[in-house]
Image (cartoon, grey):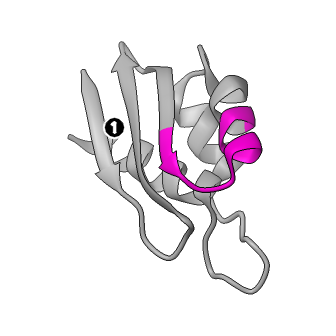
């Protein structure tokens, strides 16, 4: 299933991804720091969503209380709860 979730408190505007039997595929951030968001997307490709959440949740960007990886973790967690 494909998800597109607006982000909050970060430079990116949204994150989209596919969740196939609990596995993360095709992560795409709209906006944000291109190199960083592409790197995060590549690293979680094929990873179990629960593992991605465990690794990314709580990461902060500078003085912000969240980050693009944290926003992805939050979106994955919501998708898993559906």
Tell how many labels.
1
Does 32 appear in magenta?
yes
The image shows residue 52, relative to residue 19, as above or below, that is below
Q: Residue at x 50, y 43 (%)?
A: 29
Where residue 22 appears, as percent x and y from the top left, is: 41, 20
Does 20 appear in magenta?
no
The image shows residue 11, relative to residue 71, as above or below, that is below
The image shows residue 69, relative to residue 79, as above or below, that is below
Q: Quadrant of residue 62?
A: bottom right
Quarter of the picture containing the C terminus is: top left
The answer to which of 5 and 77 lies nearer the viewer is 5
Where residue 15 appears, as percent x and y from the top left, is: 43, 45
Where residue 58 appears, as percent x and y from the top left, is: 66, 65
* Residues in magenta, as a range: 29-39
Q: Residue furthest bottom?
A: 63
The answer to whether 28 appears left or right of 67 in the picture is left
Where residue 28 appears, as percent x and y from the top left, is: 49, 34
- Which element is circle 1 on? helix
Q: Residue at x 67, y 50 (%)?
A: 56
The image shows residue 12, relative to residue 48, as above or below, that is below
Residue under pointer 1: 80
Quarter of the picture containing the N terminus is: top left
The answer to whether 46 appears left or right of 27 in the picture is right
The answer to which of 13 and 46 lies nearer the viewer is 13
Q: Residues within 10 Å of mark 1 (few under 14, many from 20)?
A: few
The answer to whether 34 appears left or right of 25 in the picture is right
């Amino acid at each position: 299933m494909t998800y597109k979730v607006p982000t909050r408190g970060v430079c990116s505007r949204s994150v989209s991804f596919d969740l196939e039997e609990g596995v993360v595929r095709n992560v795409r951030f709209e906006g944000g720091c291109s190199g960083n968001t592409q790197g995060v997307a590549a690293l979680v490709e094929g990873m179990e969503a629960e593992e991605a959440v465990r690794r990314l949740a709580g990461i902060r960007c500078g003085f912000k209380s969240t980050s693009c990886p944290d926003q992805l973790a939050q979106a994955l967690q919501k998708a898993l709860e559906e």
